[in-house]
Image (spheres, helix red, strand yellow):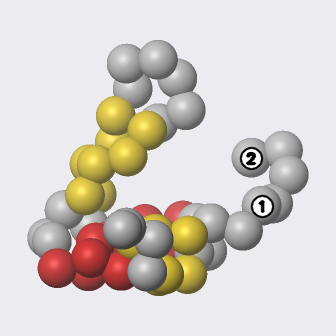
Amino acid sequence: MKKRFPTFVDETAQLFDTIYFSGGKVGCQVRMAPDDLGLLVPFVYADLAV
């Protein structure tokens, strides 16, 4: 990332062994355990889904 923006992940992600998210390019999806994502990108779990 060029700039550090706050990153938020819906708290329900903690219920899954793996989650998928965009890799930043068209057609690039990444599968990873939520805890492993936290090792790469600092984020906060939040109540995002309605």
* Image-quadrant location for residue 43: bottom right
The answer to whether 7 appears left or right of 37 in the picture is right
Q: Looking at the picture, how far across and down is residue 46, in whole percent?
A: 48, 81
**Residue at 15 percent of width and 71 percent of height:** 16
x%, y% of residue 31? 26, 48
Q: Position of residue 8 (x, y in %)?
A: 56, 70
Sort mark 1 into few (<14), some (14-19) or many (20+) by Cα contacts within 10 Å: few
As drawn, is 41 to the left or to the right of 34? right
* Between 33 and 7, the one nearer to me in the picture: 7
Quadrant position of the C terminus in the picture: bottom left
Q: Amino acid at mark 2?
A: Met
Distance from label 2 to label 1 (Cα)? 9 Å
* Relative depth, front residue between 47 and 4: 47
Name the residue rendered at 43%, 80% in the picture.
Answer: 47
Quarter of image, res 14: bottom left
Q: Residue 27: which quarter of the image?
A: top left
Disc marking residue 28: none
Task: Please tell me whether residue 14 is drawn above or below residue 21 in the rendered image.
Answer: below
Q: Is residue 4 visible?
A: yes
Q: At numbered mark 1, what does the secondary structure look like: helix, strand or loop? A: loop
Q: Tags 2 and 1 in contact by the CB under 8 Å rule?
A: yes
Residue closest to the far right: 3
Q: Give the residue at mark 1.
A: 5
Mark yes or no: residue 35 visible. Answer: no
Query: In what element is the residue under mark 2?
Result: loop
User: Residue 1, percent across and down?
Assistant: 74, 46
Q: Which residue is mark 2?
A: 1
Q: Nearer the viewer, residue 21 or 1?
A: 21
Q: Is residue 21 above or below residue 38?
A: above
